[in-house]
Image (spheres, rainbow, N blue to C red):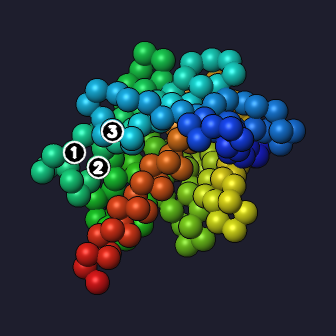
């Protein structure tokens, strides 16, 4: 697996770069606005070469307040992933289908995010903890211009939103 790391640009709080093991910039992440999506919960990954990917939380209503939907746009393709109902009450767990591939993303006991396609692990995301850096370990076959690469990178932002909302709900309950 290849390793990538998120690094914030020194003079900007709006741009985050993704670098490889050699500290070479692979792409850039920015917040974007998209109609039909929640404000401030949509992100775009622009690789140095290839199509960008947008991932965001679709606007919620009374039907999907418990089970958020995530829009995934890569090139001219658009897909929807959802929290796995029931499991999402205890930990981050997202499922769906992209181009006939079953996608399964879940938080493990170490609070890493495991990304599986057709039951095969293709990536591990280690959210920032003590080091303050987000680290991605991605299968060598998934290059930065691959249609799943941007999704892998942007899911850490969906995870962070999930954690904020879960903390808020727990604070209300207890």
Image depth: mark 3 or mark 1 in front: 3
Q: Which residue is mark 2?
A: 68
SS under mark 2 = loop
Q: Are marks 1 and 2 in contact (CB under 8 Å)?
A: yes
SS of the residue under disc 1: loop
Spatial separation of the CA atoms under disc 2 and disc 3: 14 Å
Image side of residue 5 versus residue 166, left or right:
right
Identify the residue shown where x is 45% and y is 49%. Answer: 158
Compare residues 168 and 166 and report the one nearer the observer: 168
In the foreground, 133 or 64: 133
In the displayed structure, would residue 60 be above or below residue 98? below
User: Tag on residue 39?
Assistant: 3
User: Which class describes the residues within 10 Å of circle 1: few (<14), some (14-19), or many (20+)?
Assistant: some
Q: Nearer the viewer, mark 2 or mark 3?
A: 3
Return the residue found at the far right: 22
The single residue placed furthest to the front in the displayed view is: 11
Q: Is residue 51 visible?
A: yes
52 to the left or right of 129: left
According to the image, label 1 marks what residue?
60
Q: Is residue 130 above or below residue 79?
A: below
**Mark 2–mark 3 contact, CB under 8 Å?**
no
Residue at image x 32%, y 76%?
Answer: 171
Circle number at residue 143: none
């Amino acid at each position: 697996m290849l390793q990538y790391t998120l690094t914030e640009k020194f003079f900007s709080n709006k741009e985050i770069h993704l670098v490889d093991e050699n500290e070479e910039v692979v792409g850039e992440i920015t917040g974007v606005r998209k109609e039909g999506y929640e404000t401030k919960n949509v992100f775009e990954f622009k690789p140095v070469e290839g199509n960008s990917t947008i991932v965001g939380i679709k606007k919620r209503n009374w039907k999907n307040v418990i089970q958020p939907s995530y829009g995934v746009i890569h090139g001219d393709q658009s897909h929807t992933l959802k929290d796995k109902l029931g499991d999402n009450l205890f930990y981050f767990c997202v499922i769906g289908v992209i181009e006939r591939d079953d996608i399964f993303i879940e938080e493990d006991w170490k609070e890493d995010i495991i990304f599986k396609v057709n039951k095969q692990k293709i990536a591990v995301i280690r959210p920032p903890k003590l080091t303050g850096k987000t680290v991605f370990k991605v299968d060598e076959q998934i290059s930065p211009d691959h249609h799943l690469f941007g999704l892998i990178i942007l899911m850490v932002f969906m995870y962070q939103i999930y954690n904020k909302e879960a903390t808020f709900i727990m604070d209300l309950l207890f």
